[in-house]
């Protein structure tokens, strides 16, 4: 991972962890440079294979024609690529209100839509804007530029000091918009630039000017974006934007080379579907957003293989586009979904979803024995389903399904008002569900909307491929129409054309310039904490300058995301129960659902009910970060010392009268007189030794929730010896039940894990088998003290608190399915419990009983009591 990405993630983690100290600020124009890089991005070149195999046509071929449209693509080849783009155009499921848009539509019916060009003097201690110009794209092309009048104020030899007077102005009022654009194109020409900073890195000791190019779309932040793009009444996209639906499709040929010999193994034809959104409102905020997916296509009979040069040419000549149910029809080989800093493969070719069902099942069964990811087989089945439009698998589907937008479940939610926040990060996900550690600062994101592909295709067939024109969460949008896709060539194909033809400048200058697709900096957590560092609050540049252009799979800006698929029954993080629409109300019941015993009730006891009434969300967890334990079952032995305070249980209301009467009768019948004295008094309270049982939830690697149930018994009693009266013996058994809910924090994540813990619970107990001198009391058992019940209500509230610490040692530590993924550990800990005894002794004259129970006589009713002990357990986790 590159250094800049690590810095960005570190800053975002701080912002999420300490949001109260982060103050988003409106960013004035004369300050936005603090958030920008001081170097221009570089154009990503055309792939060598695209150039060598003439992806866009051979300009030296006599039959080559590029007139309709003039875009650097042979017109006949353009038709073929356009048909491909429509054939493989995705269906997008909205988890967001905003749709991919045609940015040129923002110019419709407007007198002006500007490309802003700010010139910054960055030579001094404080950078400042020395010139600010605009190019009105609406007027671009209305009056062609005479290249002889293009201003030459930026000299090729820019090492000379720049005149900051009138001659420095890039444009003047007598130059057309077309001349302004042509001047920019010359200045940022990738092969012969007039701007020194395009050629050399920034040197502080050389006078220099930095130009920032940007569009400014409606809205300035989350609130104004919602006002602009969400109808308050319908929660849908306003009708103004309905015809903006669009995708920019960039084809390229990917050459696959051997890792060992670096020789060419074959080729893949890839369609990049680029989606433009006017804003990004996720864990970070910025104006403008470019997202994309890669669709790798292949003839059906070659889907498991790389293509040869001849096969590439055959496909580019239109083979496989019109054929149906034939061996050479074009199908999806692989889809690469890009979101945030990651790319996830959905591979149709391995195992081959187009193979007969029985053959495919055998292959899945064979691979399952060597499965590298949990429930990878389930993902294979999802992919197989996506490959067909019907359950009978008679119609191949050529349209990817993507989920756009996701509900952020980060800690920043507790600072947001209810109503839904940070839902518009616009990454394109392959499946609905919960994606762990995927958003800014490793936040979890949830795609709440689910669409059954068979039902979707059935509805589309019934409506002639049309989808609803109400764009809102839960809707499906289709890009499979010629008016909704535009073929985008490599920039090399239009470079010279743009310098020669005004119409090409109007249509394609955006592809050649390092334009920021939105106001340069937006309010966002920790914006500007480090100067000239991207903390997620600045817009993207033109895709042709980005890391994803002409790239398949992982690259400098994207890592391979290979998830495990799991049920979301058990917690994997404290935020798992957060709901995006609750905002700060997540501090209510969503947080409580993480607390024992509610976690057990919700996740285990209520699971069958939740399964019956709602679709469970699958959980996707990155391969390298999956916890090795989610839930555990523990059993062990507890040794507890009850402090002397518990002896006061002798004076419970149900047995007290009989206790006193029996003692008095014993003295009377034994001949007590004025000379009777106590010669010896001893009392005892045995240590409790008992088994206990636990259900343990592992909330990540360090936080653990424990639900403990324990039943223990111990004897208490006393013996009194007299000088002239027979001895008196009393005994009873304490029957104690306890539920304890604990939170444990592991100090390390190794096999040796010291920890601290604390929590609360319910303790209830009574005296049983009370007897004196071997004779059982008539009321041998007292009533339960604080037995849980709903009447009175306080009896279901915690009455016991505990703290402690200990050590756990993992004997076995594995990841995988049961039984391969079972973990085994031993644990020892010390715990101190504190609670009130629960007796009402206000009417008992304890001072009168000191003769035979002096220790208990010193304890007033309801006093706080303590107990402590050691626990040893074995835990089986998975």
Image (cartoon, rainbow, N blue to C red):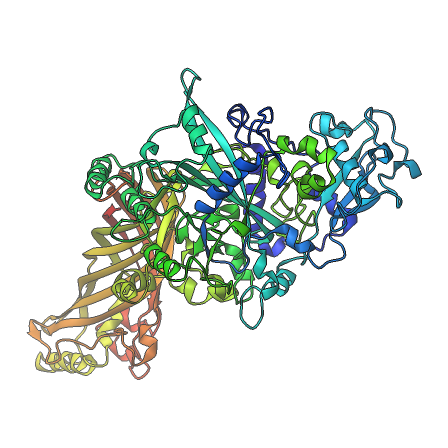
The image quarter containing residue 783 is bottom left
- Please tell me which residue is depicted at 47% across the width and 33% down the height of the picture: 316
Seen in the picture, residue 168 relative to 605 is either above or below; the reply is above
Q: Answer with left or right where residue 845 lies relative to residue 129.
A: left
The image quarter containing residue 578 is bottom left
The residue most toward the top is: 261
The residue most toward the front is: 63
Is residue 680 visible to us here? no
The residue most toward the left is: 775
Nearest to the observer: residue 285 or residue 476: 476
Seen in the picture, residue 303 relative to 583 is either above or below; the reply is above
Residue 731 x %, y %: 14, 69
Nearest to the observer: residue 202 or residue 543: 543
Residue 88 x %, y %: 44, 45
The image quarter containing residue 8 is top right
Nearest to the observer: residue 209 or residue 150: 150
Q: How many marks?
A: 0
Residue 24 x %, y %: 66, 55
Seen in the picture, residue 771 relative to 100 is either above or below; the reply is below
The residue most toward the right is: 165
- Please tell me which residue is depicted at 38% across the width and 56% down the height of the picture: 758
Residue 748 x %, y %: 40, 41
Nearest to the observer: residue 473 or residue 841: 473
Is residue 598 visible to us here? yes
Seen in the picture, residue 280 relative to 2 is either above or below; the reply is below
């Amino acid at each position: 991972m590159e250094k800049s990405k690590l810095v960005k993630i570190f800053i975002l983690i701080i912002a999420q962890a300490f949001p109260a100290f982060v103050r988003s600020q409106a960013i004035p124009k004369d300050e936005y440079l603090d958030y920008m890089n001081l170097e221009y991005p570089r154009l990503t070149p055309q792939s060598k294979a695209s150039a060598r195999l003439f992806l866009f046509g051979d300009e030296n071929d006599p039959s080559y024609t590029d007139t309709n449209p003039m875009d650097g693509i042979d017109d006949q080849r353009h038709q073929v690529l356009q048909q491909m783009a429509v054939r493989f155009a995705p269906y997008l499921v909205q988890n967001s209100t905003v749709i991919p848009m045609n940015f040129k539509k923002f110019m419709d019916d407007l007198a002006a839509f500007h490309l802003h060009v700010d010139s910054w003097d960055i030579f001094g201690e404080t950078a400042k804007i020395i010139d600010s110009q605009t190019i009105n794209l609406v007027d671009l092309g209305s009056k062609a530029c005479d290249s002889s009048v293009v201003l030459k104020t930026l000299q090729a030899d820019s090492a000379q000091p720049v005149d900051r007077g009138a001659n420095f102005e890039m444009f003047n009022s007598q130059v057309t918009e077309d001349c302004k654009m042509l001047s920019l194109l010359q200045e940022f020409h990738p092969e012969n630039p007039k701007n020194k900073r395009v050629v050399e890195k920034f040197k502080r000791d050389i006078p220099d000017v930095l130009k920032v190019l940007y569009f400014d779309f409606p809205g300035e932040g989350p609130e104004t974006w919602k006002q602009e793009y969400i109808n308050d009444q319908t929660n849908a996209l306003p009708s103004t934007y309905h015809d903006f639906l669009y995708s920019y499709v960039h084809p390229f040929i990917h050459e696959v080379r051997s890792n060992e010999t670096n020789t060419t193994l074959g080729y893949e034809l890839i369609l990049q579907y680029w989606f433009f959104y006017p804003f990004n409102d996720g864990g970070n905020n910025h104006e403008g957003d470019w997202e994309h997916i890669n669709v790798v296509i292949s003839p059906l009979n070659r889907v498991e293989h790389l293509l040869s040069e001849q096969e590439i040419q055959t496909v580019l000549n239109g083979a496989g586009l019109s054929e149906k149910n034939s061996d050479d029809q074009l199908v999806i080989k692989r889809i690469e979904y890009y979101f945030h800093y990651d790319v996830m493969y959905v591979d149709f070719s391995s195992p081959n979803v187009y193979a007969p069902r029985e053959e495919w099942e055998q292959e899945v069964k064979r691979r399952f024995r060597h499965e590298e990811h949990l429930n990878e087989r389930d993902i294979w089945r999802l992919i197989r389903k996506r490959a067909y439009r019907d359950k009978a698998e008679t119609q191949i589907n050529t349209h990817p399904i993507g989920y756009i937008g996701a509900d952020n479940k980060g800690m920043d939610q507790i600072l947001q008002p209810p109503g839904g926040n940070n839902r518009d990060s616009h990454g394109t996900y392959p499946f609905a569900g919960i994606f762990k550690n995927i958003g800014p600062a490793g936040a979890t994101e949830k795609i709440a909307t689910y669409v059954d592909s068979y039902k979707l295709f059935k509805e589309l067939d019934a409506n002639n491929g049309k989808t609803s024109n109400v764009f809102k969460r839960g809707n499906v949008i289709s890009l499979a129409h010629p008016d909704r896709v535009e073929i985008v060539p490599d920039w090399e194909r239009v470079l010279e054309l743009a310098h020669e033809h005004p119409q090409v400048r109007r249509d394609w200058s955006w592809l050649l310039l390092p334009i920021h697709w939105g106001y340069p900096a937006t309010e966002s957590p920790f914006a500007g904490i480090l100067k000239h560092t991207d903390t997620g609050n600045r817009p993207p540049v033109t895709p042709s300058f980005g890391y994803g252009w002409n790239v398949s799979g992982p690259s400098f800006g994207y890592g391979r995301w290979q998830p495990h698929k799991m049920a979301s029954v058990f917690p994997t993080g404290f935020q798992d129960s957060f709901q995006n629409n609750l905002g700060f109300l997540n501090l209510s019941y969503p947080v409580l659902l993480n607390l024992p015993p509610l976690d057990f009730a919700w996740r285990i006891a209520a699971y069958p009910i939740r399964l019956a009434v709602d679709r469970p969300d699958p959980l996707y967890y990155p391969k390298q970060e999956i916890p090795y334990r989610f839930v555990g079952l523990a059993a062990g032995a507890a040794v507890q010392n009850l402090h002397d305070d518990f002896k006061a249980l002798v004076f419970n209301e149900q047995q007290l009268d009989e206790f006193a009467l029996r003692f008095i009768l014993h003295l009377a019948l034994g001949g007590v007189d004025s000379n009777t004295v106590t010669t010896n008094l001893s009392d005892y309270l045995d240590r409790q030794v008992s088994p206990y049982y636990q259900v343990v939830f592992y909330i990540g690697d360090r936080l653990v929730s424990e639900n403990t149930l324990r039943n223990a018994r111990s004897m208490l009693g006393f013996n009194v010896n007299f000088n002239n009266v027979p001895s008196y013996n009393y005994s009873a058994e304490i029957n104690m039940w306890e539920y304890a809910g604990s939170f444990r924090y592991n100090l390390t994540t190794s096999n040796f894990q010291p920890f601290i813990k604390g929590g609360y619970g319910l303790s209830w107990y009574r005296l049983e088998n009370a007897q004196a001198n071997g004779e059982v009391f008539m009321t041998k058992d007292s009533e339960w003290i604080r037995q849980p019940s709903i009447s009175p209500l306080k009896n279901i509230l915690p009455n016991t608190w505990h703290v402690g610490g200990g050590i756990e040692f993992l004997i076995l530590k594995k990841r995988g399915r049961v039984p391969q993924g079972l973990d085994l550990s031993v644990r020892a800990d010390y715990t101190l419990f504190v609670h009130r005894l629960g007796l009402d002794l206000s009417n008992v004259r304890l001072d009168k009983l000191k003769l035979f129970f002096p220790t208990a006589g010193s304890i007033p009713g309801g006093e706080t009591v303590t107990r402590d002990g050691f626990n040893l357990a074995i835990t089986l986790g998975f």
